[in-house]
Image (tube, rainbow, N blue to C red):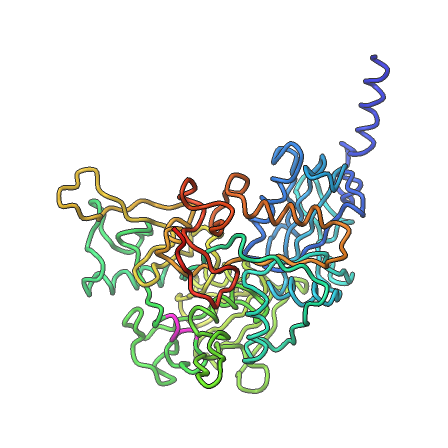
Amino acid sequence: MKLSQITVAVASLAVVPAFAAVGSLTALYGVAPANTVYVSGASALSGSFANVIAANCTGGAANVKSLTINGSTSDGRVTVCTTSSTDGQFGAPFAVVKRDTGGSFEGVGPVIDQSGLQKWADVSNCNDVSLQCGLDTTTVRVPQAGLSDVDSNVWVGMANTGALSIPVPTPTSTVLSGGFAGQGFGVMVSDSLYNAMMAKQVAEGRLPASAGGVACVAGNLTPGACQPSISKEEYTAVVSDGLFTYVAPAAVGATSNPLTGSLDTINLCRRVETSGTQASSNVYFLNNSCGNATPTKGFKPPKTVDFSGGGVNPVTFSSGAGDAVTGNYDDFGGAFGLFEGSGTGDMRNCVSRRNSGKNPNNVVDTLGTYAIGWISLENAPAAGRQYLKLDGVSPNAVQVALANDTDGVVDGWMADTDQRRNVVKGYYDAAPELEMLWPANTTIGTFLTSLKNTFANPAAVNTRGIFQANGVFTHAGNETQVHKGTRNGNFCSPQALAE
């Protein structure tokens, strides 16, 4: 009996060496190359996706290691399960390498036509102490599955309108699953712009001078009563290609900008054209590509960095080359900064660094401290970046009745750290449903189906910003997670309430 126990113990040590600090996933965690899954696509979903993987790991999160890429999640991350998958697909340790570069479309086109991508985590060079892997910029890997913030029809439509310069392959032998879950998106701004908008809206009587005994003044960043709001029309003006002067200073023709009443530049932090975050912005604010019907053509193009000669000084930053971000940037001759970040982390950095008067690459310039952009509600606000209300509805606070309420008016506020409660109630509709794709002939279909089903299960996934679509699970009984309605996976379709 004792000999048997010793044999088992020695065998387990041989699978997962305890002494290694640097090496491959195989050396560190016993993950065989055949048990390494490569997934590309939506960076806005990467944190939630890691939680979904953990829910499919035998023993749960206690047996999961989450590794960054060179200390950052801008290019993706690696999630390792040191036991096995609960669905029986992997009977030994496994890993999922999530590639964020380029965003959602990289989880659509390359998965459909099974084309190779570069810039993945270097699974041969990881550290189990600092919990990070290197970045491999040369090896070409074909993604085994993909994630998209919006459905494939949006990508096809964007290619038709020119908002996407890449052709979308026609799915012939691809499994496309949509409408099972989704996430909200919100307008995020630098603290400096948040404070300026608050001051203007207090002066106009749109916000109270104080709430709960606390003044609505600079530095009060608590979401709710004092949280400034932006209208859908205002943000459309910021991101529409035909309204350049809205965010430009007086030197190039603008009067005071409507958000702050000042002449200070408002810099735009958006995502690259292949990003699902950007695609959701195009659909929600510009009707692009949903409005491409004949004869209406009711859509607008988004602002972009122009490398064709229209931009004054466009540059490309790359973390692989040592830059602080990855993406395209143009300051339009000192008018305002427009950044197209490759990953969600790049967009966050663009907003936060502007508070110090720096461009996305962390270099001081003369374009002020105001920045604005669109980001998934998976991301929490932090020092340097905050959410605005959208048309008066907060993405991260809900209205509640006060304890001493005497007039029947719901005029109190409660923080919503889940960042989805107004979404699932149907009050905040900037919330597309997800799509997951994989080749029909894959050998790991059991595992991928399990991940999709886990996303759709409120009992299995309860992560910030993510909601489950109304279907198998209903809002009743899951009031903080499951939506009261659904778009049936089509973001061009109105959100229709089912309960």
Image quadrant of residue 205? bottom left
Position of 117 with respect to 100 (left or right) is right
Quarter where residue 266 is shown? bottom left
The residue that appears at 36% across and 59% down in the rendered structure is: 388
Question: Magenta residues?
Answer: 235-239
In the rendered image, residue 21, in percent from the top left (x then y), is placed at 74, 39
From the viewer's perspective, tell me whether residue 147 is left or right of residue 118: left
Query: Looking at the picture, does residue 28 appear above or below residue 145?
Result: above
The answer to whether one can see residue 402 in this image is yes
Q: Where in the figure is residue 37, as x and y percent of width and height? A: 73, 50
Asked where in the image residue 189 lies, by quadrant, the reply is bottom left
278 or 432: which is nearer to us?
432
Q: Identify the residue at the far left of this view.
A: 406
Q: Residue 83: give x, y in percent of width and height.
A: 71, 34
- State the residue lying farthest toward the top: 1
Establish if 332 lies above or below 339. Answer: below
Q: Nearer the viewer, residue 268 or 472?
A: 472
Q: Is residue 165 left or right of residue 294?
A: right
106 vs 59: above or below: below
Q: Nearer the viewer, residue 131 or 101?
A: 101
From this viewpoint, is residue 352 visible? Answer: no
- Residue at 72 percent across and 63 percent down: it is 173
For the N terminus, which image quadrant?
top right
Q: At 31% across and 62% down in the image, what residue appears?
A: 229
- From this view, report whether residue 490 is shown above or below residue 299: above
Magenta region, main secondary structure: helix
Q: Position of residue 201 (x, y in %)?
A: 24, 63
Instruction: Please tell me which residue is depicted at 48% across the width and 76% down the height of the picture.
Output: 302
Q: Is residue 299 magenta?
A: no
